[in-house]
Amino acid sequence: MPKQVDYESRRRRIAEAVCLLADEHGPEGVSMRDVAARAQVSVGAVQRCFRSKGEMLLFAVDHVGERITERVRNRLAASPDRSAAAVLGHATDEIALLREEHRAEARIWLAFVAQAAVSESLAGPLRISYTALQTLLVRLIAEATETDSADEGATPPDPQREARALLALADGLTTHVLIGHLTGREAEEVLRTHLAGLWERLGIRPRKDHQDPSPRP
């Protein structure tokens, strides 16, 4: 019988190779031949999974996003506090990619962002990714306003405006840590301070879980 090929597993394996090479050489330095060698598959196998280098790069971007999303899910599942404010804190912390073990992902993501500045084929999907993240933050802020606020006299913030600011802050902190302007711990403190201000505007008194993320190097 012909050998059955798990194409989805192979595509993820190739995406991992793309990410490693993009981290080393930037997206523009990634070739199908090098990806095949790093993934330990034939060039033909890569071409059967992806019709072009552009399609392969887009899949790799989605692959990084899926890894981050999976970590958010796992972190929320392990948290004893399931309030909207806690979920917002955990999600933002993971989006910022501040941990030492996530620096490679941060470099890869920013490499794709830099390439997207001159490549509409990458810019379009990245805009979709950022829009999805912003929509998530808008929803969590709105839910926190409705369910977690203990101060009925507090002026509710504009979820859209707050989400934009929070996403821009998380994204900017990624860059500051990568270039060494801030340490991971310093960046985490900036993020924590911003969230504390948001919770104050929401009239929320956060539990320790909300403001006690894992220590950063």
Image: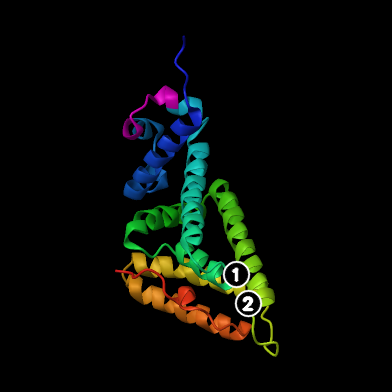
Residue 60, horizontal then vertical, whole percent: 47, 43
Residue shown at 57%/85% (left/top)? Answer: 200
| Residue at the outermost bottom position | 153
Q: Count how many numbered circles sit on residues in the image.
A: 2
Residue in front for this viewpoint, 124 or 139:
139
Residue 161, horizontal then vertical, whole percent: 64, 75
Residue 169, horizontal then vertical, whole percent: 50, 72
Label 2 SS: loop
- Looking at the picture, which amino acid does disc 2 mark? Asp
Give the position of the C terminus as an image quadrant: bottom left
The image quarter containing residue 211 is: bottom left
Label 1 SS: helix
Q: Is residue 57 left or right of residue 129?
A: left
Residue in front for this viewpoint, 75 or 94:
75
Q: CA distance from mark 2 to mark 1?
A: 7 Å
Residue in front for this viewpoint, 209 or 200:
209
Marks 2 and 1 close (CB-CB < 8 Å): yes
Residue in front for this viewpoint, 114 or 102:
102
- Looking at the picture, which amino acid does disc 1 mark? Ala
**Range of magenta residues:** 37-45
Q: Which mark is residue 84?
A: 1
Residue occupied by mark 2: 148
